[in-house]
Image (cartoon, rainbow, N blue to C red):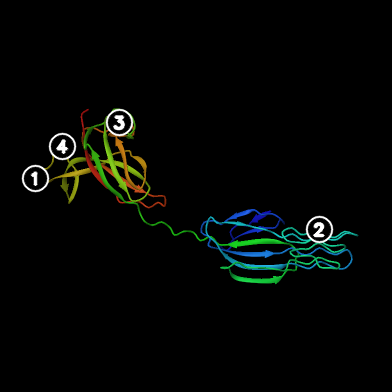
Amino acid sequence: MCERSGRFGGADTATFATPGEQPPFTVPAGVSSVRVVAIGGRGGNGEASGAGGFGAIATADLPVAAGQVLYIEVAGNGGNASPGTGGTAGVNGGGAGAGAAGGGGGGAPTTPGFGGGGGSTGFASGVTGASTAPDTTGVPSVTLTYSIVPPPRDTVAPRVGFLVFSPSTFAAANSGPSAVAAASVGARVFYTLSEAARVTFTVERTTRGIVRARRCVSRPKRPPRGAKPCTRSVAMKGSFAQDGVAGLNGLRFMGRLGATSLPRGTFRLVASASDAAGNTSAQVRQTFQIVRG
C-alpha cells in the first residue's frame, strides 16, 4: 500500500508499508532530490527463548530526475515460531526460522530461539546525507519526501512576424465564416510566430477625418473651412482567432466578421498573439481593400 500526503510546508511524502509490494513511483516534474527513509523488517519471536531482533533505519538523499521511475521494496517482518515449527521468513531477504527459532527479518535467523533483524545496509554512489540507526518500532516501511520546485514563469511574449495578403484587394464573401482553410473568394493571409500561440484578428476601417485639437476626428458632412484632412482607423465589431504554430501560418480571410460582410472600402487587419502563459504580443497591422464582388 502507498499513502501520499498533501503538501505541507512545501514538501510531499509517499509512504510504502506493504511488505513485498513493489509499486513504481514516478518522480513528479520539478523534483530533483528525494529523501528516503527505509525501515527494515524485524526478526520473529522464538517459541520460548526471546524476542527477535529489530531491523535498521537507513536514511539518504537520492538525486533523481523528473519522470524517473523508482521501484520500492519493503522488507517484511519474520514470523513468530510455534511449538515445534520455526517462523516463516520475512519477504525481501528474510530467512526462515530453524526449529523453534523465529523467522528472519532483513537477514538470516539466529539460533537458538529467535530471528535476527534486518541489519545490513548499502548506499549507491551519488547519494548524500546517508545514515543508519537501529529501529525500535518493528514496522517496516519506505517513506519518500520531496519538494516540488515550480518551473520559472514564462514571461516572454510571442511575436507576430510579417502579415501578408494575397491579393490585398478582393471581394468579401456573402456568407460563411470569417476565415477558412481554402476557398475561391477572399484572400490568403500569411503570418509568422516566434512560438505556438493563439492569434486573434480584428479589423479597423480606414475613414476620412479632420484634425481637431491635434486629434484626427470624424469628418462632418460639412467640415469647417480650412480644416486639415486626416485618415482615421475605426475598430469594427467582431473578431476571429486561429491557433498558430511556431513558424509560418496561413488562412483564407473571407472579408467577413461574424455574420457581416465588410462593405467596400479600405481596412486594416490587426493580429495579436497570446501564448499559454498569457503573454501577449504587440499588434501587427496590414492594409487590404474590399471591392464589389
Tag 4 residue: 221
**Image x and y of residue 232, in percent:** 20, 44
Say left or right for 164 vs 25.
left
- Crowding at label 3, few (<14), some or many (≥20) Cα neighbours within 10 Å? some
**Image x and y of residue 168, in percent:** 21, 38
Q: Is residue 44 depicted above or below 162 in this figure?
A: below
Q: Is residue 8 depicted above or below 262 in this figure?
A: below
Work out whether residue 168 or residue 231 is closer to the camera in this orientation and state it: 168
Tell me, yes or no, whether the two marked residues, 1 and 4, touch with CB atoms within 8 Å: no
Say left or right for 149 vs 6.
left
Tell me, yes or no, whether the two marked residues, 3 and 1, touch with CB atoms within 8 Å: no
- Quadrant assignment, res 130: bottom right
Residue at 76% across, 59% down: 90
Tag 3 residue: 183
Q: Amino acid at mark 1?
A: Gly
Tag 2 residue: 88
Q: Amino acid at mark 2?
A: Thr
